[in-house]
Amino acid sequence: MSVLVGKKAPKFTAKAVVNGNNIVEDFSLEQYIGNKHVVFFFYPADFTFVCPTEIIAFQKKIDEFEKRNVAVVGCSVDSAFSHWKWLQTEQSDGGIKGVRYPLVADASNTVSENYGVLAGEYDYNENGESIFNGEPAAYRGLFLIDKTGVVRHQVVNDMPLGRSVDETLRMVDALLFHEEHGEVCPADWHQGDKALKETHESISSYLSK
């Protein structure tokens, strides 16, 4: 599994469903470079149980991300039509209708593979034929990408373990604070808390409290 922090986020162009209804052929995160930070997250599959709880939770907090000028984008290995169908299904029936941020269709598995979250790998059998070992789905990976396209934070959960949207917002706030003030954010830092300058004295003072 790759550690992408500090590196440029892998580029891709793929189909995606945007605004909950429209399928676009050439979606890319490149559109956000220079304009927005991006929370790019992967989930295992459409029409499952844990995944809609996360996807809908991000939608419920979408105003919080937007006021921070952060784009939220989801991705799984399902087709664009599968995404579209799920987005048309009422939440009371297990769907995610009402979600408006983009969902990328990684039907070829290449985006998940390039981000290091594909739950398996390609190999060859004894006859030289290409095979896939493992499950061709994505772990619950999440990547916070800055305006220059560099990954600044990543977390990867196993499939049964849902993520915290509030923790994602906390990391967004920490990155924005650091970019604005140049100070660093200690353990459990939240917006409004005191941060630290990168000196030995300031860290020692914080730890002695």
Image (cartoon, grey):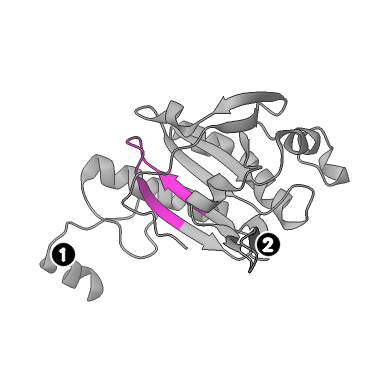
Between 160 and 76, the residue placed more toward the observer is: 76
Residue at the (50%, 38%) spot, across then down: 65
Toward the bottom, the furthest residue is 208
85 sits left or right of 2 in the view: right
Between 88 and 80, the residue placed more toward the observer is: 80
State the SS at label 2.
strand
State the SS at label 1.
helix
Question: What residue is pinned by disc 2?
Answer: 135
Residue at the (64%, 41%) spot, across then down: 60
Badge 1 crowding class, 10 Å Cα cut-off, few under 14, some 14 to 19, many 20 or more, is: few
Is 73 magenta? The answer is no
Point out which mark residue 202 bears.
Answer: 1
In this rendering, is residue 160 above or below 64? Answer: below
In this rendering, is residue 66 above or below 170? Answer: above
Toward the right, the furthest residue is 93
Region of the chain picked out in magenta, as a range: 142-154
